Image (cartoon, rainbow, N blue to C red):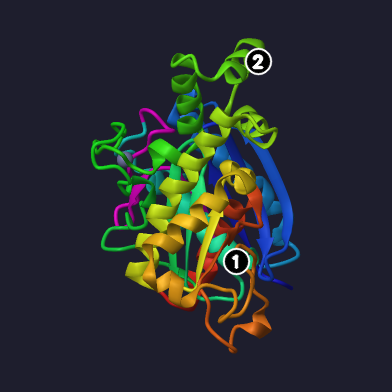
Amino acid sequence: MAPFAIGVDLGGTNLRIAAVDSNGKMLEKITTSTQVTRGRQLVILEMCNAIQQVTTKFRSSGQLAGIGVGIPGIIDMQSGLLRESPNLPGWEDYPVREEIERRLGTSVILENDANVAALGETWMGAATSVDDMCMMTLGTGVGGGIVVDGKIWNGMTGMAGELGHTPVDPNGVPCGCGSRGCVEQYASATAIKRMAVEAIATGEAPELERAMSEDPEFSAKVVYQMAIQGDEPAQKIFHTVGHSLGIVIASVINILNLPMYVIGGGVSSAWDAFSPTMFEVVRQRSFVYRNTAPGESAAGVEGTKIHDDALPVRKSTIITRALLGSDAGLIGAARLPMTRALAPV
Ligand SMILES: [Zn+2]
């Protein structure tokens, strides 16, 4: 009887729950719409009902190892309070963990959504060949997570890894966090759309203007499509994305000297539009990277996952795309109780 764990990914628009076995295989996945507007109590109730539904189904064939919940925002690990969450308005200082535990009658582990995505990629995705890594998720915002020795590095209270709020322009665009010029303002889907609107306002982006007027769903994806079709203003936006990511990754490489940096989230699909600039900037700004980059003197090819058997030859710094897509958070959330079981905090 194989043990299994429940992973929950609570987003601003979707609530997803999965049963994952100890080998990382997803046994079942349920997707519901969160409907945050209907109130936090109802969302928690729906979540608990779905957790119970999935648990009951697999309990007869294996033991429940635990429940992990990924949630957007900054979490106080000790109290289980959600301190701030831009995607879940009205949830500030809500005792999320306590509310779930009270309804389920069992303990759960609460984590930041970008942290669990990093854990998921380390367990089953792009970073399975390493124990230490850093991940950036480029979505509505920019999230970050750091994994050390196969476990999330939480910092003092659980709020570590907020890479999205690393400044790339000290006097830049004001950010929701209270700072200015954070990478989130240049490399998120929200930022890409904003930069497109700004380019249109200058009157120098006629193709973007046409696309926006024709498409009510005008989004970062449309800007990407135009960039790969050769539209210069759209390409310039992705150069900004790559440039700002390059600055942050170069700094993190210089500070932490980790073997792997993974870029995930919806915007990572635009890899071919932003990564050339990103690599160029990382090379310019990180002497640690230049000394460990894959290529002539080190194993692997820049931008791709390195083969496990090549690692002992020469250690390289790998920057690559995430592999698990939107499942990274679910798989990582399910991994939480397993990593805690191995090494209790
Ligand atoms: Zn910020």
What crowding class fits label 2: few (fewer than 14 Cα within 10 Å), some (14-19), or many (20 or more)?
few
Q: Nearer the viewer, residue 126 or 204?
A: 204
Q: Nearer the viewer, residue 320 or 9?
A: 320
Q: Quadrant of residue 35?
A: top right
Query: Which numbered disc covers residue 302?
Result: 1
Q: Residue at x 51, y 50 (%)?
A: 277
Q: Which amino acid lies under the numbered mark 1 shown in the image of this protein?
A: Glu
Question: Is residue 149 visible to us here?
Answer: no
The span from disc 2 to disc 1 (Cα, nearest Å) is 36 Å
Q: Relative to 270, is 136 on the left or the right?
A: left
Q: Residue at x 66, y 70 (%)?
A: 22
- 79 part of magenta stretch: yes
Q: Relative to 277, is 89 on the left or the right?
A: left
Q: Relative to 300, is 176 on the left or the right?
A: left
Q: Quadrant of ligand 1?
A: top left
Pointers 2 and 1 in contact (C-beta within 8 Å): no
Label 2 CB less than 8 angstroms from ligand 1? no
